[in-house]
Image: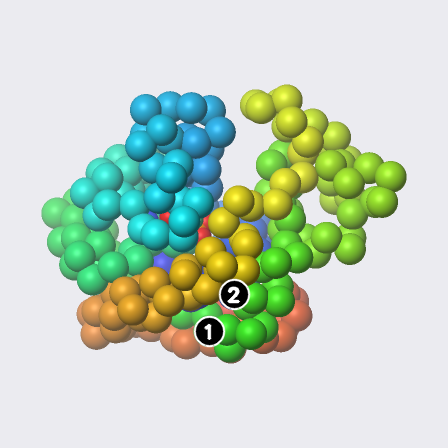
C-alpha cells in the first residue's frame, strides 16, 4: 500500500505517520525529517536548505523531486510507503504522478487532514519532538528536572548530535508558523487538488485526539 499524507503543518501528520508505520508496516518518508537530518549533520544538502527552512519557505521543487525519487526506489520502500510532507506544490504533485507512472507504482490513498489555523498555532508553539524515538509531544509532558530527556523512550541525548534528545523545531515560532500556513494555503492545497483528481482521496478532520484521528485514518484506508 502506498499512501500520501497531506495537511497543514501541525495538523498531526507526523503523529499519524507513526501509527501507520507501526500498524501497516509502511516505510515513513518524511521530507521534513530528511531535510532536518541533513541540516543537523551538516551535509551539502543541509547547508543549502537550512536558511529556507527556518523562514518557513519551501525548498526548490528540483531538489525535492530528486530526494523523493531516490528515496522511494530504495529496497525498504518496495513493500509500501507513506509520503509525509510531499508533494507541497503543483509542480511536485505533477512530478510525483509522472515519476510513479515511470517506475510502475501508484498511490492507493491520498489522506488530507485539515484543522483551523488557531488550533494549529496553539499546538505548534508548544510541541517538542524526540530525535531518538520520533515521538511528538506537548512541552507539559516533559519532566521539569530533565527537559531534554524523552519521557517516552527515556533517551537523554541524541547520539547523532550529542545534544538533548528532545528539541523544539526552529520553525515552530509563531511568525514562521503563520508563514508556513500561508504557504500551505497558497501552494499545497493546489497540490492536493491535483492528486485528488487522479487518485482515491479522503479528507479527515484533525481536531480530535491522536487516537480519534487515527480511527478515522484507519477507516479511510479500508
Ligand atoms: P515539515 O517537517 O514537513 O513541516 O517540513 C519542514 C520544512 O522543510 C518546510 O517548511 C520546508 O522548508 C521544507 N520542506 C519539507 N518538505 C518539503 C517539500 N515537499 N517541498 C519544499 N520544501 C519542503
Q: Can you give x and y, in whole percent of width and height, for residue 153 in the image?
A: 73, 38
Q: What residue is drawn where x is 16% and y is 49%?
A: 99
Ranked by sequence position, the earlier of labels 2 and 1 is 2
Above or below residue 94? Residue 52 is above
The answer for how far apart the CA atoms under marks 2 and 1 are is 6 Å
Most foreground residue, 194 or 127: 127
Q: Which residue is mark 2?
A: 11
Q: Which residue is mark 1?
A: 114
The part of the image, by quadrant, that contains residue 47 is top left
Left or right, residue 110 beside residue 193 = right
Above or below residue 36? Residue 124 is below
- Asked whether residue 205 appears in the rendered view, the answer is yes
- Do callouts 2 and 1 mark residues in contact (Cβ within 8 Å)? yes
Quadrant (top left/top right/bottom left/bottom right) for the C terminus: bottom left
Above or below residue 89? Residue 169 is above
Most foreground residue, 135 or 89: 89
Left or right, residue 5 beside residue 61 = right
Q: What residue is drawn where x is 30% and y is 58%?
A: 88
Q: What residue is drawn where x is 56% and y is 66%?
A: 121
Amino acid at each position: 500500500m502506498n499512501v500520501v499524507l497531506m495537511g497543514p503543518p501541525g495538523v498531526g501528520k507526523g503523529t499519524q505517520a507513526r501509527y501507520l508505520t507501526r500498524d501497516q508496516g509502511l516505510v515513513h518518508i518524511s521530507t521534513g525529517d530528511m531535510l532536518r537530518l541533513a541540516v543537523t549533520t551538516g551535509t551539502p544538502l543541509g547547508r543549502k536548505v537550512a536558511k529556507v527552512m527556518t523562514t518557513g519557505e519551501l525548498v526548490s521543487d528540483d531538489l525535492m523531486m530528486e530526494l523523493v525519487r531516490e528515496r522511494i526506489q530504495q529496497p525498504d520502500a518496495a513493500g509500501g510507503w507513506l509520503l509525509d510532507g510531499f508533494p507541497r506544490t503543483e509542480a511536485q504533485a505533477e512530478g510525483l504522478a509522472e515519476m510513479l507512472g515511470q517506475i510502475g507504482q501508484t498511490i492507493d490513498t491520498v489522506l488530507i487532514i485539515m484543522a483551523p489555523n488557531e488550533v494549529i498555532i496553539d499546538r505548534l508553539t508548544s510541541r517538542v519532538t524526540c530525535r531518538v524515538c520520533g515521538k511528538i509531544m506537548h512541552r507539559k509532558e516533559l519532566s521539569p528536572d530533565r527537559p531534554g530527556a524523552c519521557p517516552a523512550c527515556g533517551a537523554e541525548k541524541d547520539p547523532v548530535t550529542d545534544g538533548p534528545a528532545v528539541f523544539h523545531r526552529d520553525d515552530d515560532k509563531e511568525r514562521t508558523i503563520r508563514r508556513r500556513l500561508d504557504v500551505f494555503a497558497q501552494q499545497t492545497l493546489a497540490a492536493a487538488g491535483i492528486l485528488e483528481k487522479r487518485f482515491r482521496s479522503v479528507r479527515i478532520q484533525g481536531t480530535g485526539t491522536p487516537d480519534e484521528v487515527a480511527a478515522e485514518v484507519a477507516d479511510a484506508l479500508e
